[in-house]
Amino acid sequence: MNGAEANRVYEFDGFTLDPMRRTLTDRDGQEVAITAKAFDALVYLVEHAGETVQRAELAEALWPTVVVEDNNLSQTILALRRSLGEVEGGRRYIATITRQGYRFVADVAKRARNAPAHSDGTPAAPDAHAAPAVASAAPAVLAPADPAGVARSTTAAAASAAHATATSWRTWAVAATVLIGGASSRWALRSGTASKCSHPPPCTRRPSKRGPSLSCPSAT
């Protein structure tokens, strides 16, 4: 028996067989009295329910290290039938296959140990009408606007616009001043040059036979 099979619980006709806990309980939840070898035989037959288990195979599973007489296996199966409540002409769980062995003939349901079971011993099925859990996102709620905050935002925007306008005017004023100053400098330069060119040169004295004379060149 591997780990997965050991973790299973087998149910048949109101009985519950737990291989790991080595318990057999009836439909009322009462533990059934059963010998150790009869319990081992029941587990092996239930795990192979519907199959014919040869006598030699079952004997080797129950006594893997020793050789026993064939009568020991017959007495073990007889003890198992008594524990299950089999009587002549009544409900049969174990069928004897002539010259072969035994077969477990009851319907067997398997379930995990922690899974719930119905009162009749059958595993509980999941509720088909159960609504699936769906995580619903809560709708976002917008908080009402704060009048004071709106007023502060409007005032700040107006101040920013006024600052931008003042800066623009200052920029234009500086540019105009530069342009006017440049024009004035060029005008003064041209005026000075014109005055310098229009001023007549000074007169000079020149000697002559008649005496010194004053010579004034004409302005150009």
Image: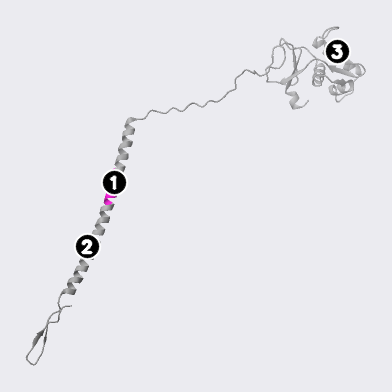
Q: Residue furthest left?
A: 210
Of the residues tagged 1 and 2, which is closer to the observer?
2
**How much space separates mark 3 and mark 1, taking CA atoms?**
111 Å
Q: Is residue 13 left or right of residue 177?
A: right
Q: Position of residue 52 (x, y in %)?
A: 86, 20
Q: How many marks?
A: 3
Determine crowd level at label 1: few under 14, some 14-19, many 20+ residues with C-alpha closer than 10 A: few
Q: Is residue 206 left or right of residue 44?
A: left
Residue appearing at x 33%, y 30% in the figure: 147
27 and 151: which one is in front? 151
Of the residues tagged 3 and 1, which is closer to the observer?
1
Is residue 151 highlighted in magenta?
no
- Residue 165 got which mark? 1
Is residue 169 highlighted in magenta?
yes
Residue appearing at x 21%, y 68% in the figure: 190
Is tag 3's residue or tag 1's residue first in the polypeptide sequence? 3
**How much space separates mark 3 and mark 2, taking CA atoms?**
135 Å
Quarter of the image containing the N terminus?
top right
In the picture shown, does residue 198 fall above or below 93? below
Q: Which residue is mark 3?
A: 78
Highlighted range, magenta: 162-170
Which residue type does callout 2 highlight?
Ser
Coloration of the structure image = one colour
Q: Position of residue 89 (x, y in %)?
A: 85, 6
Residue appearing at x 30%, y 40% in the figure: 158
